Amino acid sequence: MKSDLTHIGPDGRARMVDVGNKDVTERAATAHGRVRMQQATFDIAIGRDTKKGDPIAIAELAGIMAAKRTADLIPLCHPLPITSVKVAIEPMEGQPVLNVTATVKTAGKTGVEMEALTAVSAACLTLYDMLKAVDKAMVIEGIELLKKSGGKSGTYTKAKA
């Protein structure tokens, strides 16, 4: 049975993809997610001062740290020499929502999509952790890859809905 899934071998078993013969190229990926919350929680978050510290700064740092540890979390993900990680958390205009965006870069033989998605996930989870004392009904949503570049498959940009 043939599969287009690169992490499944011809015998049906999981495998780490062999990237040994791939060219080293500049690669980048950007991912996005959101944390939706009550207005009072949002006001606390953007006030950037809680008993635990600045929830936005701490979540941005957590995203950076998570990107660097992606291969430890995702079983078949290659450890990569990351050259840059940027995580930004911004309020959504007119709604009690914090938008989380992460961009990760490397010069390597495989892409950094998983690192960008992991950074966003960890940042969103950290916001939840920092603010859950006042709002357990927060919703983490919309975690997705927005763009990736580099490598044999070239550039991907998510179509606008």
Image (spheres, rainbow, N blue to C red):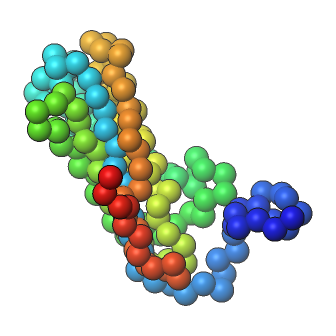
Q: Is residue 92 visible?
A: yes
In this view, the residue in front, 104 or 141, is 141
Q: Is residue 37 above or below residue 104?
A: above
At 29% across and 50% down in the image, what residue appears?
Answer: 101
On screen, residue 70 versus residue 159, left or right, reads: right
On screen, residue 77 versus residue 158, left or right, reads: right
In this view, the residue in front, 68 or 111, is 111
At 60% across and 50% down in the image, what residue appears?
Answer: 74
At 47% across and 64% down in the image, what residue appears?
Answer: 112
In this view, the residue in front, 92 or 112, is 92
At 60% across and 84% down in the image, what residue appears?
Answer: 22
Rendered location of residue 139, percent (x, y): 36, 26
Q: Is residue 68 visible?
A: no
Q: Is residue 12 above or below residue 10?
A: above
Count of numbered marks: 0
Rendered location of residue 72, percent (x, y): 59, 50
Image quarter (top left, top right, bottom left or bottom right) of the N terminus: bottom right
Q: Is residue 142 above or below residue 138?
A: below
Rendered location of residue 86, percent (x, y): 28, 57
Rendered location of residue 42, percent (x, y): 18, 25
Among the 4 quarters of the image, the one containing residue 104: bottom left
On screen, residue 36 versus residue 11, left or right, reads: left
